[in-house]
Image (cartoon, rainbow, N blue to C red):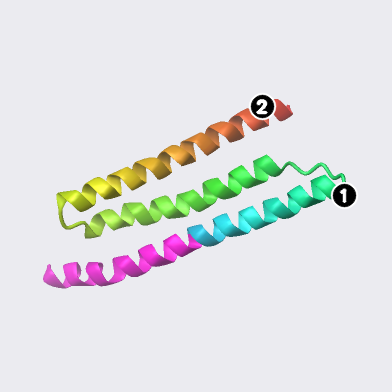
Amino acid sequence: MDFLHTLTSIITPIIVFILEWMGIFVIAWTCLKAFWEYIQNTFMKRHIKIQTHLAKGLATGLEFKLGAEILKTVTVHDLDELIVLGAVFGLRALMSILIHFELKHTDKDDE
């Protein structure tokens, strides 16, 4: 049992780190791509649906970050850490729900 606890305390932070960076990469790439699409829409008079692409990318990035937050619950040591982790998780989940709600409204408007 002690071996599993030690293994979990070593591997979990590595996986959390990787998931956090995956989320950061997806969000940064999506924002850069959306900015490029904005430039194309503005100066080249194209009609790319920036909001839909941006919202989908942000939602995907947030899902990676939420996965990291879920894994962080394995390494919580006291109640204060759990409260902070719960607050961060709640805010990220709320952002994800709002983005999905916006996507549904955008899809209905396009029909």
Q: Position of residue 74 (x, y in %)?
A: 24, 57
Query: What residue is pinned by disc 2?
Result: 108
Identity of the residue furthest to the right in this view = 44
Query: Measuring 16% from the left and 73% from the top, which residue is drawn there?
Result: 3
Q: What stretch of residues is rendered in magenta? A: 1-22
Location of residue 97 with respect to 40 vertically, above or below: above
Of the residues under marks 2 and 1, which one precedes in the sequence?
1
Q: Indicate whether residue 3 is drawn in magenta.
A: yes
Residue 107 image-quadrant placement: top right
Checking the image for residue 44, the label placed there is 1
Location of residue 20 with respect to 56 vertically, above or below: below
Q: Position of residue 31 (x, y in %)?
A: 63, 53
Element class at badge 1: loop
In the picture, which quadrant includes the C terminus? top right
77 sits to left or right of 34: left
Query: Measuring 73% from the left and 29% from the top, which residue is drawn there?
Result: 110
Q: Indicate whether residue 84 is drawn in magenta.
A: no
At label 2, the amino acid type is Lys
Q: Position of residue 57 (x, y in %)?
A: 59, 49
Query: Measuring 58% from the left and 33% from the top, which residue is drawn there?
Result: 102
How would you classify the magenta stretch by its main secondary structure? helix
Q: Position of residue 92 (x, y in %)?
A: 42, 44
Location of residue 95 with respect to 34 vertically, above or below: above
Location of residue 11 with respect to 88 vertically, above or below: below
At label 1, the amino acid type is Met
Q: How many marks?
A: 2
Query: Measuring 35% from the left and 53% from the top, which residue is drawn there?
Result: 69
